[in-house]
Amino acid sequence: MEFSELIKTATVENVLLWRPGLAAPVRGTLCITSHHLLLSSCPRGDLELWLLIRNVDAVEKRVSGSSGTITLRCKDLKVLQLEIPGMEQCLNIASSIEALSSVDSVMMMYPFFYRPPSLRLEQGWHQFPLRRFFQRLCSQTSQWRLSTVNRDFSACPSYPEAVIVPAAVSDDTVTKAARFRQGGRFPVLSYFHPRNGTALLRSSQPLTGHNRRRCREDEKILGTILDEGERGFIIDTRSAQAAKQARMSGGGTEPKSSYPQWRRIHRALERGRPLQESFIRLVEACSDPSLSMDRWLARLDSSRWLSHIKAALSTACLAAQCLDREDSKVLVHGAEGTDTTLLVTALAQLILDPSCRSLQGFQGLLEREWIQAGHPFQLRCAHSASSHVRGKQEAPIFLLFLDCVWQLSRQFPFSLEFGEELLLTLFDNAYASAYGTFLCNNEKERWVLCKVKESTHSLWVWLNQPEEKHKYLNPLYSHNPLVIWPSVEPQSIQLWQGLFLRWIRPSQHLDEAWQEIQRLVEGNNNWSKESTGKRLSQTLPDTTAGTENGK
């Protein structure tokens, strides 16, 4: 397929662009390329619009007389309106954007064509290897080992090549246990809590089925990590009823008779279509300027988005509490183990582990617990909140995670090294990006099928460039070695206005306030350094004077 075949009209003059935040509409020349929509203003020729076409979620067209209007609803929740002279040109432009935005071949997407001069291919893809995480683990315990049982992705196609498993368990045992878990996602270590030696594991549901099938190897894995008389907790992110129904289709839960030391707790977290519908309802409410305050609050409540945040944070706190206060090991799983499971394990680590709250540590957490762990970004982020396509696979699980992180940053403004700008950038790039980090659904697809790591640039390399990195740092950050326990009371959980109202409410004053905070903090740091230097110069002996006196 050639991109030129999809572009019916490449250039249109005298196009009027309107978008929230613009003081007045801009008139200029519209150009369509294989991956971008460009508009340069007339007569100055300034570039007013540079939109990655993959960012377009829905195209709405309206023709009136000899002209037409195209409304572009983007995955990052931006809304653009183009008034185009000529009915045929309007229809051609709309058709071209629809065709280009729905190209589903991974290797035809923009990251495979993007070549910034400041970056090198293959740079950054090995920035957060699991081996480095394991080396830190080795300094704390010898109960775990790094296994390459999945080096050819045969044991589990959605796991990475290397995983951390109990040291006392052989690869043969792991391989057999994988056949007993949905999608082969056998229990692996997610986090080791150094304070008391407890561990957080994740997996998918066991395939017990209606006849309560057993797997000795799976029982051995979970039995090995518990000492005699010790108990562990299995946090199932489905309701008890949903888990029971899963048995009829071959899934299920760990029976008490086979896992006597493990206690199961159900904490139902929505995923899939219900979560996507909640996201859609919230965006629709935020986009409706005609709502009264009472009506707006009712729409916000009926979307249930804040309820999903509360449920996710509550479940993560439960996992963290079992580890930190109950001194118990925890296994988290739902059905597939690729969505709500990762949501809980990642949030629990942010709550417990101060290293995950640094900029580098947070990137490593995302790489380990979302990207390498097999969250299907390509399926879940195929569409955002405005698409007219109602697929079964889309779900804003990763957005829900980012929103929960924002709630933590708001409740603990000094404890996270990064700020809101990083979270917004991650959201934008998960749905449409110039980088290959969020492409595909698992490591097998990235490494073997699509060669993503050989042919695209890593988002982390771009974020960590000195000229970019400072944008994402929290100037108020102060290392906090303690566990941070968020409040999940209704008054404590707020709408993430920086995301959901980003293109609706002007952010100029907030941006200026944030810049002033940065300036004040930097000025205070400089003053502290100068003051320290003066005190040192006053207390240290003057070696030059001493030498002169000795002559």
Image: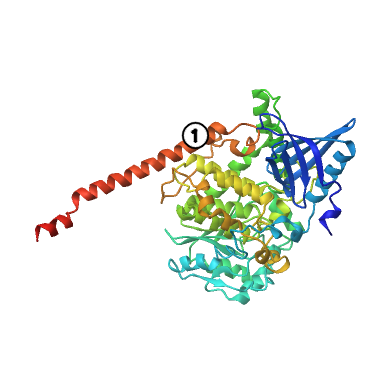
Position in image of residue 113 (x %, y %)? 71, 59
Query: Splitting the image into 4 quarters, where does residue 161 fall?
Result: bottom right
On screen, residue 216 versus residue 536, left or right, reads right
- Residue 401 spot, x, y in % from top left: 60, 48
Q: Position of residue 76 (x, y in %)?
A: 68, 43
Query: Quick one: 320 or 362, which is closer to the camera?
Result: 362
In the image, what residue type sits under mark 1? Ala
**Left or right of 14 in this view: 551:** left
Q: How is the image coloured?
A: rainbow
Quarter of the figure that contains the C terminus:
bottom left
Quarter of the image with the N terminus in it: bottom right
Residue at image position (57%, 58%) is: 461
* Residue 268 place in picture, x, y as percent: 64, 47
In depth, the one of 220 and 96 nearer the eye is 96
Q: Is residue 128 shown above or below 7?
A: below
Q: Residue at x 9, y 57 (%)?
A: 549
Q: Specify few, some or many for label 1: CA neighbours under 10 Å numbering under 14, 14-19, or 20 or more.
A: few
| Quarter of the image where one finds residue 119 | bottom right
**149 w.r.t. 70: above or below:** below
Q: Nearer the viewer, residue 396 or 18?
A: 18
Q: Nearer the viewer, residue 304 or 280?
A: 280
Q: Which residue is mark 1?
A: 513
Q: Is residue 529 left or right of residue 212?
A: left
SS at circle 1:
helix
* Residue 319 visible in image: no
Task: Using the rendered image of the protein, determine whether residue 182 is visible from the camera's viewpoint.
Answer: yes
Residue found 52% across the figure and 51% down from its top: 467
